[in-house]
């Protein structure tokens, strides 16, 4: 009789699927692996968690490996429960790291614990970012984060019809502010959330009353003396 915990068995099955994906080099092979494992709810939930650009955990490899954390009263029984917890507790507190460690204590192998850390920090590399939504049924797809990018005018001038306006290129960082249900968040053009912009978002909220919209622009440093 096996002495393995239910959590270890669950994570071992997940690791086996993920390893197959990581070792597969062809798109058709990856699609086959995904399609063959859609009946595994743990795999599907993990992929949706990792690939959703709007889910952030506030945890980094540096932070989670810094020290051995103690505390954390959450009794997490599955990786799905841990991902759900981190989705709604995503400020990177020591308490949340301790919660991850407490779940890891239920696992009997180092590679399974390492997998939990990579999932919690969303650093697990799979190479299926764009392939997932093309492969799975609509109910399993994740939101996609995409923005318009500039093109060389000479290459597309024949498509431009009518009057148009040319503006000066501002050399800053692309920023998208999404305001939903009265709360604003700032993102890079690749969907990574900006941190530390609370003051800017506070001013933005006081100036903009519209809700459930997206604003696209440049984030510039106002340096005295610049033109």
Image (cartoon, helix red, strand yellow):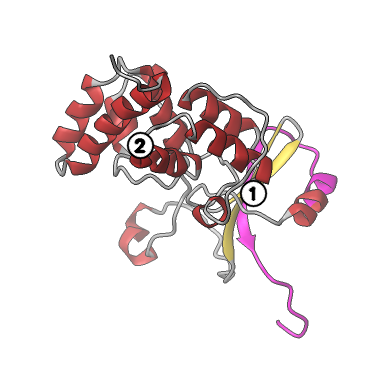
In the rendered image, residue 171, in percent from the top left (x then y), is placed at: 57, 71
In the rendered image, residue 191, in percent from the top left (x then y), is placed at: 51, 47
Above or below 160: residue 30: above
Secondary structure under badge 2?
loop
Q: Residue at x 61, y 61 (%)?
A: 218
Q: How far is the residue under mark 2 from the one under mark 1?
A: 38 Å
Q: In this image, 1 relative to 153: left or right?
A: left
Q: Determine if the magenta segment contains residue 226.
A: yes
Q: Nearer the viewer, residue 184 or 84?
A: 84
Please tell me how crowded label 2 is: few (under 14), some (14-19), or many (20+) other residues with Cα within 10 Å: some
Residue 57: name its quadrant.
top right
Q: Residue at x 34, y 66 (%)?
A: 154
Residue mark closest to the camera, 2 vs 1: 2
Label placed on residue 186: 1
Q: Nearer the viewer, residue 223 or 95?
A: 95
Q: In this image, 177 relative to 102: left or right?
A: right
From this viewpoint, is residue 195 visible? yes
In the rendered image, residue 224, in percent from the top left (x then y), is placed at: 78, 81
Reading the chain from its start, which is encountered first: label 2 or label 1?
Answer: 2
From this viewpoint, is residue 55 visible? no
Q: Residue furthest right?
A: 206
Residue that mark 2 sits on: 109
Q: How many marks?
A: 2
Q: Nearer the viewer, residue 222 or 79?
A: 79
Q: Residue at x 39, y 31 (%)?
A: 47
Q: Residue at x 53, y 23 (%)?
A: 81
**Which quadrant: the N terminus?**
top left
Please tell me how crowded label 1 is: few (under 14), some (14-19), or many (20+) other residues with Cα within 10 Å: many
In the image, which residues are magenta? Answer: 204-227
């Amino acid at each position: 009789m096996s002495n393995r915990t239910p959590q270890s068995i669950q994570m071992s099955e997940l690791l086996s699927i993920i390893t197959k994906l990581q070792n597969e080099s062809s798109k058709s092979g990856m699609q086959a692996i995904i399609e063959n494992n859609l009946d595994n709810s743990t795999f599907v939930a993990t992929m949706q968690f990792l690939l959703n650009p709007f889910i952030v955990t506030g945890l980094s490899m540096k932070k989670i490996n810094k020290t051995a954390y103690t505390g954390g009263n959450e009794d997490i029984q599955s990786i799905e429960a841990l991902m759900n917890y981190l989705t709604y507790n995503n400020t990177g507190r020591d308490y949340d790291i301790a919660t991850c460690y407490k779940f890891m204590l239920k696992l009997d192998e180092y590679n399974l614990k390492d997998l939990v850390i990579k999932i919690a920090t969303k650093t697990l590399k799979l190479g299926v970012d764009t392939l997932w939504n093309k492969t799975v049924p609509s109910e399993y797809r994740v939101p996609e984060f995409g923005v318009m990018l500039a093109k060389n005018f000479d290459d597309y001038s024949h498509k431009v019809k009518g009057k148009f306006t040319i503006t000066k290129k501002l050399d800053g960082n692309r920023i998208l502010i999404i305001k939903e249900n009265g709360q604003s968040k700032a993102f890079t053009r690749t969907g990574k959330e900006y941190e530390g912009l609370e003051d800017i978002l506070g001013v933005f909220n006081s100036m903009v009353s519209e809700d459930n919209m997206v604003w696209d622009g440049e984030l510039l440093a106002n340096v005295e003396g610049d033109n």
